[in-house]
Amino acid sequence: MQDISLHILDIIENSVRAKASLIKIEIIREMMRNELIFIIEDDGIGMDYNTLESAQNPFYTSKLERVKKVGLGIPLFKQNAEMCNGRFELESELGKGTKLMAIFQYDHIDRMPLGNMKDTFVGSIIGHPEVDFDIVLKNIELDGTVDEFIFSTREIKKELGDIPLSYPDVMTFIDQLMEEGIKKIKMEEF
Ligand SMILES: Nc1ncnc2c1ncn2[C@@H]1O[C@H](COP(=O)(O)OP(=O)(O)OP(=O)(O)O)[C@@H](O)[C@H]1O
Ligand SMILES: [Mg+2]
């Protein structure tokens, strides 16, 4: 993986495959702690204890269709976070959902760039209109100043009424909203 947005995309796809109806994503730059934090939570089918343990090791997958019989998404994300003096936590409950947290040392020399989060978000939202997304982006500066951007497809759907998310103007609207949010919290700097 060349950037963190590809990890996020993989985690979102895992949640979608787990039949999540709501995916919550939080990205926080915490300058006082020098951390870049990713929290992704879904209300999908969840994992039992064995699957949860296996998922954190390479070579486990429940995908049937695959040729290479390995699941690498989670282990690689974990490895990258830990390599950057960070942490990785995965919690799951069968029938309830799954929560993942990855923390990177923000200024670690090996930390990969964030990548194009806007396209990752917009692509996931448009690509999975049946799934709702709650996105919270936060920037906490050294002096404690907090900038926050909150986005919810449920709110947008409420406003849209009968107009589907796939409607071209809606896509443009979501794209612009996301771009403004990213600017507001200075995520280009992350
Ligand atoms: N959010 C989730 N809910 C339920 N099960 C999950 C979730 N995320 C991962 N899993 C389980 O963990 C396995 C490993 O996930 P991982 O992303 O590492 O590999 P993969 O998705 O199978 O393959 P790859 O990501 O390499 O294409 C999945 O096959 C699935 O069984
Ligand atoms: Mg995966």
Image (tube, rainbow, N blue to C red):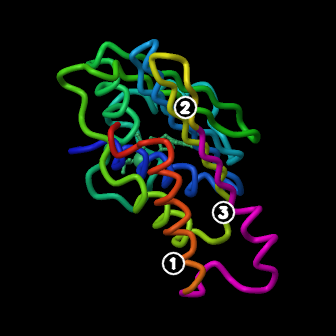
Residue 188 in percent (x, y) is at: 34, 46
Tell whether circle 2 marks a residue whose Cβ is less than 8 angstroms from ligand 1. yes
Residue at screen point 43% across, 46% down = 8
| 29, 64: nearer the viewer | 29
Mark 1: amino acid: Thr
190 left or right of 148 in image: left
Residue at screen point 57% across, 68% down = 128
| 128, 144: nearer the viewer | 144
Report, in whole angstroms, how far the alpha carbon at label 3 lies from the one at label 1: 19 Å
**Callout 1 crowding tier (Cα within 10 Å): few <14, some 14–19, many ≥20:** few
Residue tagged 1 = 172
- Secondary structure at badge 2 equals strand
User: Vertical placement of 84 versus 56: above or below?
Assistant: above
Residue at screen point 55% across, 31% down = 100
**Callout 2 crowding tier (Cα within 10 Å): few <14, some 14–19, many ≥20:** some
User: Vertical placement of 109 versus 2: above or below?
Assistant: above
Magenta stretch contains residue 77: no
Between disc 3 and disc 2, whose residue precedes? 2
Residue tagged 2 = 100
Mark 3: amino acid: Val
Q: In the image, which residues are magenta?
A: 148-168
Report, in whole angstroms, how far the alpha carbon at label 1 lies from the one at label 2: 30 Å
Q: Which mark is residue 131?
A: 3
**Callout 3 crowding tier (Cα within 10 Å): few <14, some 14–19, many ≥20:** some
